[in-house]
Image (tube, rainbow, N blue to C red):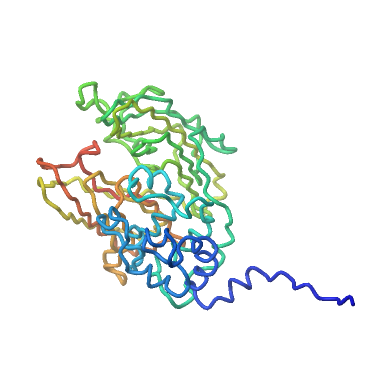
């Protein structure tokens, strides 16, 4: 006898996500269960090797405040997941293993950490990665719904792309540092000035940068108005910071005294969009001094190359003109074979709405912390990194409101294992203590 039946309708994905009683319960069911427990189940060889089981009954206790089995990560002071928020993110071995967006850093700087996960499968979706990142930033709680479900709407995945030219912006300008050599076991830092054909001011609301592998940093500068015309660099000519003998080229150093920071990165690929209605104003009849620094620690010659796009909008679309934050401590002395902590506080004479922060230091830096100084949030940690090569670019949405008289305290820890004192300098073997950002 034929019996009709009603086919169950597919449940609404959002209703499924909303049905979980906590953020971690969702992570367990939608991420660990679907991507990880095929390997990380009690008794499997993968679980035995990693000493990590991610099934529902034990996963939280297996992860939070637990040291990793990987000896290199353990020696680096990592936990699988800590519960100290911002500070724990860069100390999380779980995040190191999942964060496909940082692939080059993972395999270049930490090859002893093994492979990115999930092993042999697709990377987690970008929305899932951001969901996990926010969970760690919020203290990795077991209970409570603490992360916005809308993040999971991003189902795209990271794809490894070869270095290639950027597409020309529809509205804006493209800059290019052509291929240049970096000799084995050396630093090379260059500038090349490229003019803008802009009879009126322009307003930048997006910036894209892509660099050939091995770059330490790329920065866009323009010049202060008091730069004498006889000091203005000739366009499209590479100016090295060092000569062939490793000595400073003082003509290059002289022009550097008149730089105004515009934007920069230490990441191979960067796309940054200013908040809605915010743009950076660039004066008429100007140009950019393009600064590329490569630190070649290999025995082979390396080729550097950079593309940068600036996207512009009409002035009528601008509600707030962005200002550049550049806090710099050059009073650096790191005694040989010692750990040194340097602190410096910068206070602001007017209210600032800060929407971007990122640090810059060199290879002796082990921790870079930024605290709010003054006001109701005095002493609050707002930025942390222990990665001098790829410091995170912190985007603050909504902006961090800094009332008049408040500011930032920089606290940076350096470990100098060399038999020489280290001072401020431009090479990666020297040191720096800088905080960049943007505000209005």
From this view, report whether residue 249 is shown above or below residue 60.
Answer: above
From this view, report whether residue 36 is shown above or below residue 419.
Answer: below
Quarter of the image for residue 80 reads bottom left
Residue 198 at what x, y percent from top left? 50, 32
**Looking at the rendering, in which quadrant would you find the N terminus?**
bottom right
From this view, report whether residue 387 is shown above or below residue 191.
Answer: below
Seen at 23% across and 49% down, the residue is 365
Q: Between residues 84 and 193, which one lies in front from this camera angle? A: 84
The count of marks equals 0
Residue 292 at what x, y percent from top left? 36, 33
Task: Give left or right: position of 188 versus 202.
Answer: left
Q: Between residues 362 and 282, which one lies in front from this camera angle? A: 362
Seen at 40% across and 69% down, the residue is 138
Quarter of the image for residue 213 reads top left
Residue sticking out furthest to the right: 1
Q: Between residues 246 and 171, which one lies in front from this camera angle? A: 246
**Looking at the rendering, in which quadrant would you find the C terminus?**
bottom left
Task: Give left or right: position of 148 versus 362.
Answer: right
Residue 185 at what x, y percent from top left? 26, 30
Residue 84 at what x, y percent from top left? 32, 68
From this view, report whether residue 300 is shown above or below residue 284.
Answer: above
Task: Give left or right: position of 13 versus 306.
Answer: right
Q: Between residues 47 and 274, which one lies in front from this camera angle? A: 47
């Amino acid at each position: 006898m034929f019996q009709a039946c009603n086919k169950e309708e597919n449940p609404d994905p959002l209703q499924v996500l909303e049905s979980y009683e906590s953020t971690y319960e969702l992570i367990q069911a939608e991420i660990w269960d679907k991507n990880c427990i095929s390997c990380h189940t009690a008794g499997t060889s993968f679980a035995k090797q990693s000493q990590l089981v991610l099934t529902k009954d034990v996963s939280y206790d297996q992860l939070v405040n637990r040291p990793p089995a990987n000896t290199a990560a353990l020696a680096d002071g990592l936990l699988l997941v800590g519960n100290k928020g911002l500070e724990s993110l860069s100390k999380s071995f779980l995040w190191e293993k999942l964060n496909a967006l940082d692939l080059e850093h993972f395999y270049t700087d930490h090859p002893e950490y093994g492979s990115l996960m999930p092993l042999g499968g697709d990377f987690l979706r970008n929305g899932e990665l951001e969901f996990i990142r926010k969970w760690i930033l919020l203290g990795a709680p077991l209970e409570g719904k603490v992360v916005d479900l809308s993040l999971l709407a991003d189902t795209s995945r990271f794809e490894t792309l070869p270095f290639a030219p950027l597409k020309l912006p529809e509205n804006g300008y493209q800059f290019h540092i052509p291929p240049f050599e970096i000799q084995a076991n050396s630093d090379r830092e260059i500038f090349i000035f490229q003019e803008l054909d802009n009879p009126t001011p322009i307003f930048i609301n997006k910036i894209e940068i892509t660099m050939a592998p091995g770059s330490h940093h790329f920065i866009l500068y323009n010049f202060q108005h008091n730069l004498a015309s006889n000091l203005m660099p000739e366009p499209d000519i590479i100016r090295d910071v060092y000569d062939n003998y490793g000595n400073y080229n003082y003509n290059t150093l002289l022009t550097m005294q008149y730089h105004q920071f515009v934007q920069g990165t230490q990441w191979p690929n960067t796309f940054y969009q200013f908040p809605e209605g915010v743009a950076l104003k660039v004066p008429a009849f100007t140009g950019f001094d393009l600064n590329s620094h490569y630190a070649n620690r290999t025995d082979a010659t390396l080729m550097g190359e950079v593309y940068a796009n600036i996207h512009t909008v009409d002035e009528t679309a601008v509600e707030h003109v962005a200002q550049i934050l550049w806090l710099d401590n050059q009073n650096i002395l790191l005694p040989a074979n010692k750990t040194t902590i340097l602190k410096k506080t910068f206070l602001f004479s007017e209210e600032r709405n800060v929407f971007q922060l990122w640090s810059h230091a060199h290879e002796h830096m082990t921790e870079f912390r930024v605290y709010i100084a003054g006001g109701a949030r005095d002493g609050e940690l707002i930025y942390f990194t222990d990665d001098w090569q790829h410091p995170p670019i912190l985007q603050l949405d909504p902006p961090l409101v800094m009332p008049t008289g408040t500011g930032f305290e920089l606290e940076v820890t350096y470990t100098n294992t060399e038999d020489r004192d280290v001072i401020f300098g431009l090479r990666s073997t020297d040191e720096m203590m800088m905080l960049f950002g943007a505000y209005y």
